[in-house]
Structures are given as C-alpha cells and as structure tokens.
Image (cartoon, grey):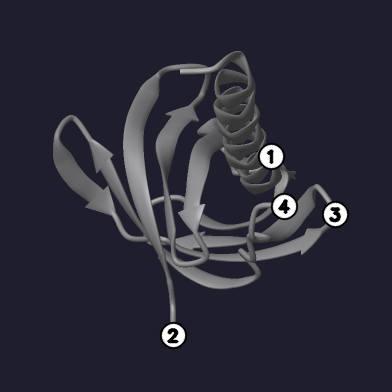
Amino acid sequence: MTARRVRSLTLVVLSALVVVAGSSIARAQAPAAKLDINGVWTFTVMVDGAVSGTPTVTLKTDGEKVTGHYSSMTLGEADLTGTLKGAALEFSFSVPDAGDVIYKGTVENNNSIKGTLDIAGGAVAGTFTAKHKE
C-alpha cells in the first residue's frame, strides 16, 4: 500500500469518527423532555410492607417551585410546598399531632413518580408510587 493510499484511508476513518462523535455529542446535549406534574395524582403509600393509604395529591409547578394539596383518610387535608429540580421532586406539609411529612421522589415520566416518605423525623418511614389521574 502506498503512503498516499494510507493517508487517504486515514482521513476517511478520521472523518467518520468525527461524524459519529459529533452526532453522539448532539444527542447528549439535546434537552430532555420537560416533565409536567401539574394536576391530580393518586399515591399508593407502603409502610412496613403493606399499603397504608392512597392519598390524592394535587400538584402545581411554577419553575422549580411546587405547591398543592394533600388529602388522605390517614393524615387528613393539608396544603403542601416543595421543589422539582430536574426529575427530583420533594414536598412537605405539617399535620397536627403527627409533625412534618416529607415526600421525596423521582418523576419517572409525566404519569409516574416513585420515592420515599418520612413522618415526624423518622418515626414513620415508607415508600410510595404515584400515578397521574386521568
């Protein structure tokens, strides 16, 4: 193989690598689809491996700020506040005689959230899944 042929093949391979690398970078930098958690959600709360409640939670976002309302047979009614940073959701509210309730989760998509909850500084802890009500 001649030196000229080797240089030509090298340029072709390098050009292909630049194209592949460039398209990978473009895909990696493409903005993720915006999560929309606004609306009414049905939560399923698990404590000690058993379902302990199915609260209804209404969420509204304004940038990273989250506000809304929590309603359950167990903890009653409460307004909530929190944040949504990327897919990380956290909100909290206070319940008379029970203390602070903190939910932390990951928004998997516009219809699903999973995470943990903490009541009264660890007195009660559990997990939850949530589905957007239709």
Numbered disc 1: secondary structure: helix
Q: Report which residue position mark 2 lands on.
A: 134
Disc marking residue 22:
1
Q: Nearer the viewer, residue 127 or 71?
A: 127
Query: Dividing the image into 4 quarters, which one contains the C terminus?
Result: bottom left
Question: Looking at the image, is 56 positioned above or below residue 11?
Answer: below
Q: Report which residue position mark 3 lands on.
A: 63
- In primary-sequence order, the first of circles 2 and 4 is 4
- In primary-sequence order, the first of circles 3 and 2 is 3
Label 3 – label 2 distance at C-alpha: 23 Å
Q: How far from the left and from the top, in percent, is residue 56?
A: 46, 66
- Label 4: how many residues lie within 10 Å, few (<14), some (14-19) or many (20+)? few
Label 2 – label 4 distance at C-alpha: 27 Å
- In primary-sequence order, the first of circles 4 and 1 is 1
Numbered disc 2: secondary structure: loop
- Identify the amino acid type marked 1: Gly
Image position of 22 (left or right of 130): right
Image position of 68 (left or right of 12): right
Image position of 48 (left or right of 67): left
Contact between marks 3 and 2 (CB within 8 A): the answer is no
The residue mark sitting in front, 2 or 1, is: 1
- Label 3: how many residues lie within 10 Å, few (<14), some (14-19) or many (20+)? few
Q: How far from the left and from the top, in percent, is residue 71?
A: 50, 63
Label 4 – label 1 distance at C-alpha: 16 Å
